[in-house]
């Protein structure tokens, strides 16, 4: 019997040694991976975590560590290069640097090559795996703890670093995955289109960056009008790229997934909490309900997971905030805290509810029109910023069936060739493409504010930034005009879509703005009118002017524009957008004054 036991021990010993060596090897790999992750060697860390996962996929530390290493590879590159495009070199299949992305020295360079060369690989090698890795973390309810924190270089010259940690919770993976879904939605929208643009035409036309900046400051309407030279010279720009257009069908589903993840993260941080979390102050996003009343209020704190920082030139700044105390937190004693916690519990609840509702709309699980005014839920302190005049059917704007979608080129303003008359009434011979965009300075404008092409007989006939009047006048843009001809592709599209290929006037009425031009940070701007090729935006826009129409003449003029299901046309959409612009410019003007007063102090 003893001999049998000795033989059994001898036979088991090699197996035990193999198992011990395997466990020791895996532990060693995990330790190496963690060291590389904590010290900022993210690509090496990801490779090591992958080795561990191949042996035991359920290892939570490896799953979470791999996700962090993968995402921080891109985050670190973006921060350290100032968001530069060199980040693409990490995933591009060939040597790349930002200077080769825009080869301005080559007149015939195909700008669309950036998509297949960089955007598609970036999506395939960064975004898609990142979503997959985050999903595994969420499915396995993983968390990750690092006492030291993860070193992240935020600037190379001068060198600046921060350390993020310590406790990464499962709900943080929802936030990361949500961000990746939104980035993927943007990428898919770009990838589905042809981006080949004759940029040299624009550079030749404007002659210099200085001229562009000068014109933006003094004549922003003129700048927008003249951008048509790029579109007209690039017949494929923003049209479908046939072999890639299927990507557009993924835009709406990715927005829906991103919204769903954001709602889950906000609920976890601000509403549900984590009863098993002993110390929220250690969390990357740790919300502390100080008075334990289950409400978001000024007594609370939010911890941001920055546990240390270093710079070779004094204090470190992140997004304009100087980091002095660690871990970094936001409380009611800070300006950011006053805004964050002053919004109240009702605001947080309403935002989460709207985000969940929008995720249902974008996913197609719920079909309804979304009023722009619903987005006021995102504006704190009960302010009303978005108008109730415009409603959107996202199932038509971003359809999941590519056969029902239209390319971005068809959603641009109409354009054509314009040959302005000279001061003596004769043609200048400077015919060039222009978008049908005009500016209105308001009823209080005077003659000194006008931007116009003067003629001998009627100095205001060809005014494109002026006092209220008729926009897109028939004598300038009409079918019988000698000054303007619609681009053939625009004419064909409008004829096919609406049964006409001519421009209709937008008359001045009581909905015209009363204010004159706005000056914000040195840039003078009127309100804009645009004559859209398709003002319904593929049947997705509806306009109800009831709330902005005055009594009397306006009520009579707008009798046909009251109701939720009235498709937009160029009159109703422009009048709604004008009032939205005024609201926006009013807000920006106030903010500009406040910022300047704070700077003086």
Image (tube, grey):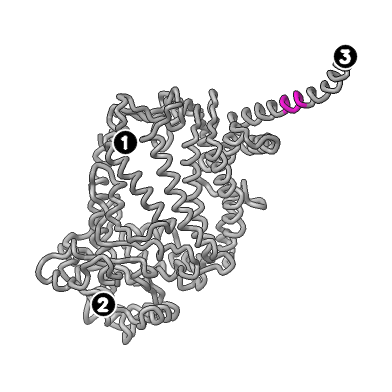
Badges 1 and 3: C-beta atoms under 8 Å apart?
no
Q: Earlier in the sequence, mark 1 or mark 2?
A: 1
- Dot 2: few (<14), some (14–19), or many (≥20) neighbours within 10 Å? some
471 sits left or right of 321 in the view: left
Q: What is the CA distance from the residue labelled 1 to the residue labelled 2? A: 47 Å
Nearer to us of marks 2 and 3 is 3
- Magenta stretch holds residue 323: no
Q: Are marks 1 and 2 in contact (CB under 8 Å)?
A: no
Residue furthest to the left: 552
Residue extending farthest bottom: 480
In what element is the residue under mark 2?
loop
Please say if the residues under marks 2 and 3 sit with CB atoms less than 8 Å apart.
no
Helix, strand or loop at label 1? It is helix
Q: CA distance from mark 1 to mark 3?
A: 75 Å
Residue at x 60%, y 50% (from the top left corner):
97
Give, as a single range, the part of the protein colored magenta.
19-25
The image position of residue 418, as x and y in percent, is 37, 77
Quick one: quadrant of the C terminus?
Answer: top left
Give the mark nearest the N terminus, 1 or 3. 3
The mark nearer the N terminus, 2 or 3, is 3
Side (left or right) of 181 relative to 114: left
Identify the residue position indicated by label 2 in the image. 505
Which residue shows up at 62% across the image and 46% down it? 90
- Residue drawn at (88%, 14%) of the image: 1
> Which residue is under mark 3?
1
Asked whether residue 44 is in view, the answer is no
| Residue neighbourhood size for the residue with mark 1, other residues' Cα within 10 Å, grouped as few (<14), some (14–19), many (≥20) | many
* Quadrant of the image occupied by residue 25: top right
Q: Secondary structure at mark 3?
A: loop
Q: Residue furthest top?
A: 2
* Residue with the mark numbered 1: 340
What residue sits 23% from the left and 55% below the top? 583
């Amino acid at each position: 019997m003893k001999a049998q036991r000795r033989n059994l021990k001898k036979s088991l010993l090699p197996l035990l040694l193999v198992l011990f060596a395997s466990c020791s090897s895996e532990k060693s790999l995990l330790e190496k991976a963690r060291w590389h992750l904590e010290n900022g060697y993210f690509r090496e860390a990801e490779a090591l975590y992958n080795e561990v996962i191949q042996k035991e996929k359920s290892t939570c530390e490896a799953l979470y560590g791999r996700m962090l290493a993968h995402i921080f590879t891109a985050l670190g590159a973006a921060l350290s290069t100032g968001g530069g495009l060199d980040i693409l070199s990490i995933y591009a299949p060939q040597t790349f640097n930002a200077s080769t992305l825009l080869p301005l020295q080559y007149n015939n360079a195909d700008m669309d090559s950036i998509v297949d060369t960089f955007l598609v690989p970036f999506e395939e090698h960064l975004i898609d795996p990142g979503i997959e890795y985050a999903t595994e973390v969420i499915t396995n309810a993983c968390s990750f703890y690092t006492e030291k924190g993860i070193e992240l270089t935020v600037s190379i010259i001068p060198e600046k670093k921060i350390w993020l940690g310590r406790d990464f919770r499962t709900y943080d993976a929802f936030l990361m995955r949500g961000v990746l879904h939104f980035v993927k939605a943007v990428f898919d929208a770009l990838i589905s289109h042809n981006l080949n643009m004759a940029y040299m035409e624009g550079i030749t036309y404007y002659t210099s960056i200085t001229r562009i900046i000068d014109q933006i400051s003094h004549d922003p309407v003129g700048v927008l009008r003249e951008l048509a030279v790029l579109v007209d010279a690039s017949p494929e720009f923003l049209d479908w790229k046939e072999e890639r257009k299927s990507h557009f069908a993924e835009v709406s589903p990715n927005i829906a997934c991103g919204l769903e993840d954001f709602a889950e993260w906000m609920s976890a941080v601000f509403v549900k909490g984590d009863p098993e979390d002993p110390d929220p102050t250690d969390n990357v996003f740790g919300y502390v309900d100080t008075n334990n009343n289950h409400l978001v209020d000024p007594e609370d704190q939010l911890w941001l997971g920055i546990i240390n920082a270093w710079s070779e030139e004094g204090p470190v700044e992140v997004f304009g905030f100087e980091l002095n105390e660690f871990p970094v937190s936001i409380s009611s004693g800070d300006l950011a805290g006053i805004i964050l916690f002053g919004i109240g519990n009702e605001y947080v609840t309403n935002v989460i509810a709207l985000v969940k509702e929008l995720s249902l709309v974008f996913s197609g699980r719920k079909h309804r029109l979304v009023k722009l005014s619903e987005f006021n839920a995102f504006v704190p302190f009960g302010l009303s910023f978005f108008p109730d005049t415009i409603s959107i059917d996202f199932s038509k704007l971003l359809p999941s069936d590519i056969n029902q979608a239209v390319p971005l080129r068809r959603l641009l303003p109409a354009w054509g060739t314009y040959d302005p008359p000279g001061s003596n009434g004769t043609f200048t011979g400077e015919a060039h493409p222009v978008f049908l965009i005009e500016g209105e300075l308001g009823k209080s404008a005077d003659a000194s504010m006008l931007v116009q092409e003067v003629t001998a007989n009627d100095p205001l006939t060809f005014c494109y930034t002026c006092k209220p009047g008729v926009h897109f006048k028939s004598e300038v843009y009409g079918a019988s005009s000698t000054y303007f001809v619609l681009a053939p592709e625009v004419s064909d599209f409008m004829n096919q879509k609406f049964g006409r290929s001519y421009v209709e006037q937008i008359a001045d009425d009581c909905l015209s703005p009363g204010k004159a031009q706005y000056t914000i940070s040195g840039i003078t701007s009127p309100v804009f009118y645009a004559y859209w090729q398709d003002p319904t935006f593929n049947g997705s826009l509806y306009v109800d002017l009831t709330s902005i129409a005055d009594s009397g003449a306006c009520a009579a003029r707008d009798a046909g524009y009251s109701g939720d299901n009235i498709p937009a046309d160029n009159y109703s959409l422009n009048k709604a957008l004008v009032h939205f612009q005024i609201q926006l410019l009013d807000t920006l003007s106030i903010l500009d004054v406040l910022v300047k007063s704070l700077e003086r102090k």
